[in-house]
Image (cartoon, grey):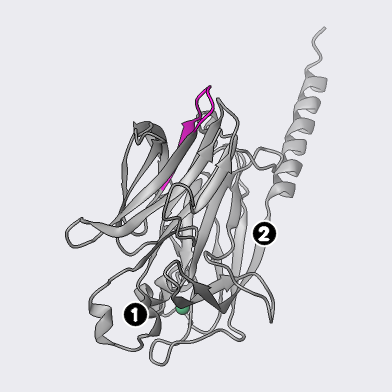
């Protein structure tokens, strides 16, 4: 005979268990970033001073780009969510002269209260703060953080990093997917942070005339020049017939066209699942993608069944006329 009392008790017990798991899994991610000077010798022998974010404490170093910050979001039906508390430590931070001294963290593309937006013009403190961000599950994808003081200068000084909103399962484990949609699953993932450098900006201060004209000389992926296919900015060794996800994050101050080419120069297809932190209703398969400053695209491609090498690459282009910059192509590499 069917025991409805027992069935109800089992259901109630299951509901309690789900509630307990859901409460336990939400994470508060506390990260502290500091600002440090970083000297880098470029491919032409010139030394450029960057300002970069780092995770270190008082004397800790910084990296170009800054540390990757990851935040989890949960499957449908679970109401809790991770919260990021990102604190900017201003101890020993290198500074521009007044009135553009100070630094902030702007969580680009994230939906945050105005006071946490890191924009000095709307009242954000420029001497250190804690920036709070709680994403919803619809926000899975790639974002960026950067300093919003004297924006183009501080940004291209190196004050940026990747902010990744990643799906978790119901138990709180990371999923190797772009979103909760299983079609976005990957075997390998890499960030491709795009940026450009006009060294004149690095020494100019205040309202110098140099800021009227942006003339980049160095072109980067993940802080590296990668000027030829044989000396790529980023490389990955992947299995054949596997799925590779690239998180394309536009922190450059120019235009850029991204593609993936084989050794013979033929463009290979890839599928865009998420743009600017929002999933496409219908994923789009492309062989070329224009990426403007501030844009992000989460893409996946499948490696072939035969051995070879493909070259994800970006051609940086002038904002004014769309002309490709000399030496403005930066290569990545995927071998399989
Ligand atoms: Cu700054």
Which residue corresponds to the image point at 38% horizontal and 32% vertical from the top-left? Answer: 268
Left/right of residue 167 with respect to residue 138 in the rendered view? right
Residue 153 placement: quadrant: bottom left
Q: Secondary structure at mark 1?
A: helix
Q: Nearer the viewer, residue 297 or 165?
A: 297
The crowd level at tag 1 (other Cα within 10 Å; few <14, some 14-19, many 20+) is: some
Which residue corresponds to the image point at 32% horizontal and 43% vertical from the top-left? Answer: 289
Which residue is at the far bottom? 98
Q: Which residue is mark 2?
A: 28
Which x, y percent locates residue 318?
24, 61
C-alpha gap between disc 1 and disc 2: 40 Å
Residue 3 placement: quadrant: top right
Any part of residue 32 in sight: yes
Which residue is at the far left? 321
Q: How many marks?
A: 2
Q: Nearer the viewer, residue 84 or 306?
A: 306
Write the start and end of the magenta stretch as one range. 297-308
- In the rendered structure, does residue 94 fall within the stretch colored magenta? no
Is the residue indicated by label 1 positioned so its CB lies within 8 Å of ligand 1?
no
| Marked residue nearer the N-terminal end (1 or 2) | 2
Q: Which mark is residue 200?
A: 1
When the figure is inspected, residue 295 is found, relative to residue 217, above or below; the finding is: above
Which image quarter is the C terminus in? top right
């Amino acid at each position: 005979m069917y025991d409805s009392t027992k069935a109800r008790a089992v259901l109630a017990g299951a509901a309690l268990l789900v509630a307990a798991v859901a409460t336990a899994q939400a994470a508060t991610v506390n990260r502290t970033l500091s600002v440090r000077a970083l000297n880098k010798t470029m491919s032409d022998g010139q030394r450029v001073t960057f300002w970069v974010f780092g995770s270190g404490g008082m004397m800790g170093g910084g990296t170009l780009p800054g540390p990757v910050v990851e935040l989890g979001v949960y499957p449908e039906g679970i109401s809790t969510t991770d919260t990021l508390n990102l604190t900017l430590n201003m101890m020993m931070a290198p500074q521009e002269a007044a009135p553009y001294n100070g630094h902030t963290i702007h969580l680009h593309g994230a939906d945050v209260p105005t006071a946490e937006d890191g924009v000095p013009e709307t009242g954000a403190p420029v001497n250190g703060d804690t920036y709070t961000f709680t994403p919803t599950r619809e926000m899975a994808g790639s974002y960026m953080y950067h300093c919003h003081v004297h924006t183009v200068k501080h940004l291209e000084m190196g004050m940026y990093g990747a902010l990744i909103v990643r799906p978790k399962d119901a138990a709180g484990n990371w999923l190797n997917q772009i979103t909760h949609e299983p079609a976005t699953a990957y075997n390998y993932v890499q960030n491709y942070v795009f940026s450009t450098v006009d060294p004149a900006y690095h020494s100019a201060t205040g309202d110098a005339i140099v800021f009227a004209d942006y003339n980049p000389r160095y072109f980067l992926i993940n802080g590296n020049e990668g000027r030829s296919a044989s000396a790529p900015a980023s490389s990955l060794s992947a299995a054949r017939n596997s799925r590779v996800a690239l998180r394309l994050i536009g922190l450059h101050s120019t235009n850029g066209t991204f593609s993936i080419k084989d050794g013979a120069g033929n463009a290979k297809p890839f599928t865009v699942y998420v743009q600017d932190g929002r999933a496409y209703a219908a994923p789009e398969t492309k062989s070329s993608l224009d990426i403007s400053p501030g844009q992000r695209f989460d893409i996946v491609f499948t490696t072939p069944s035969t051995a070879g090498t493909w070259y994800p690459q970006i051609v940086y282009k002038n904002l004014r006329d769309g002309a490709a910059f000399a030496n403005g192509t930066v290569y990545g590499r995927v071998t399989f």
